[in-house]
Image (tube, rainbow, N blue to C red):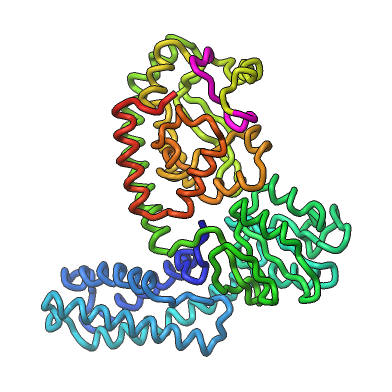
Amino acid sequence: MYENKIYRWYKHWDFTLLDIICMEIAFRLAATLRIGDPMGSQLYRHIAIVLIVLNICVVFFGENYKGILKRGYLVEAEMCLKHVLYIIAVLLIYLFAVKETGSYSRIVFFLFAVFYFGLTYVCRCLLKRHLRARGKANNGNHSLVIIVDRANAEEVVTNICQCNFGEFCINGVAVLDDEMVGQEIAGIPVVADGDTVLKYLKETWVDEVFIHIPNDMEVSQELFDGCAEMGITIHLRLADIVPQGMNQTVEKIGNYTVLTKSVKMVTLRQKVLKRLMDIAGSLVGLVITGIAFIFVAPAIYIKSPGPIFFSQTRIGQNGKRFKLYKFRSMYMDAEERKKDLMAENEVADGMMFKIDDDPRIIKGVGHFIRRTSIDELPQFWNVLKGDMSLVGTRPPTEDEWEKYELHHRKRLAIKPGITGMWQVSGRTKIKDFEQVVALDTKYILDWSLSLDVKILFKTIEVVAKREGAA
């Protein structure tokens, strides 16, 4: 799923924090000049806290930081003035609602507005200068591959790097009309050409691609279809290229206006609420995990001496690798024995591994914690870290991922989850991997917060009845 970056306010957490600091300094300075020490007054201590909450609300529901790194000094002054006036207006509405408008000095609020405007304007300009100076860093959270032609490659890569501001981790460049693999353009390695770009996108962690080619040059429909099947977000320089079958919006990358296409787009509020639900659920889950550990750990160790927890590299959203954690339910040599058992795998083509009465499972305790899904509890740590979500698609192992065809990768277009559509649809009865992909794809296309809640309740029911567990 893709979130439109135009509305992604929290990427500017540094400006939010800076504004809050400037606001508190301005308020205390204004109150001190008028009434002395403001922290000695319960009323003014209360307002100092209320201002922080109001500031965050104004930032969340407004677009004060939209394009902030590209704004000039005059535009920044105008935006700072609007921000201060919004804060004052919301503060007055709050004081009117709680019937305390007459308890505070109007001069304090006037001085506060003046000081706040001056401080936040100067500090924003200084922070922007600092970020622009170091803003070419290639350390963003979203993996981007730039697809260009040879003639424009240097200009395009340089422009995006200079205007990156930590938004993207630029993994590489694909030059469609020349063989340059192994070379560098503006410090970014060339990783593919027109013949190998799809293969590279399939085998590497890639969240998004940016395509910039001249109007008289064609990009194969196979590339568009491949990205669509894998769930990779496509940014197109606005031209005569209009791939079908995906959600779209207009954005900016560097100084380029692009048409962005993605299999599923979500709003900021949906994404924030899903993450908040994940954090709350994972904290509760970790408490349950701690309680379970007291009983499970000795039982595992007695039956099979060794680590209580099992960790394994899994493939997450758009091919990003992470460590997944479980209570160990198998003997220590389980991974080695898996190779000998592949012939008994009940899932066609080896896209997943599943057999009845798996001999690698620790007798007694292993079967119990798998039937009750207790072995999955440590994954709440993965959810808290942000590698996973409460609800999503199950992350494949590295060897499974290497066998994926293009359309299989679409199930990795979102964060993997502890539970999901497949798990509550009777996973032990589903032995056709294409059915799993179909269920996961349906979940991605139909995703909503209410669907997540339904799946969570269904999961509780399934676990309570011990259905669908291996």
Residue at 53% from the left image edge and 79% from the top image edge: 125
Q: Can residue 138 be seen here?
A: no
Quarter that holds the C terminus:
top left
Residue 350 lies within the magenta run: yes
Camera-side residue of 368 and 76: 368
Q: Can residue 214 be seen here?
A: yes
Q: Is residue 166 left or right of residue 417?
A: right
Task: Tell me where residue 84 appears, x and y as whole percent.
Answer: 36, 82
Examine the residues drawn in magenta and state their main secondary structure.
loop
Residue at 34% from the left image edge and 37% from the top image edge: 459
In the image, residue 11 above or below residue 397: below
Camera-side residue of 389 and 462: 462
In which image quadrant can residue 376 be found?
Answer: top left
Task: Tell me where residue 315 appears, x and y as whole percent.
Answer: 59, 40
Q: Magenta residues, as a range?
A: 348-360
In which image quadrant can residue 337 be found?
Answer: top right
Task: Tell me where residue 361 appears, x and y as whole percent.
Answer: 49, 16
Camera-side residue of 212 and 23: 212
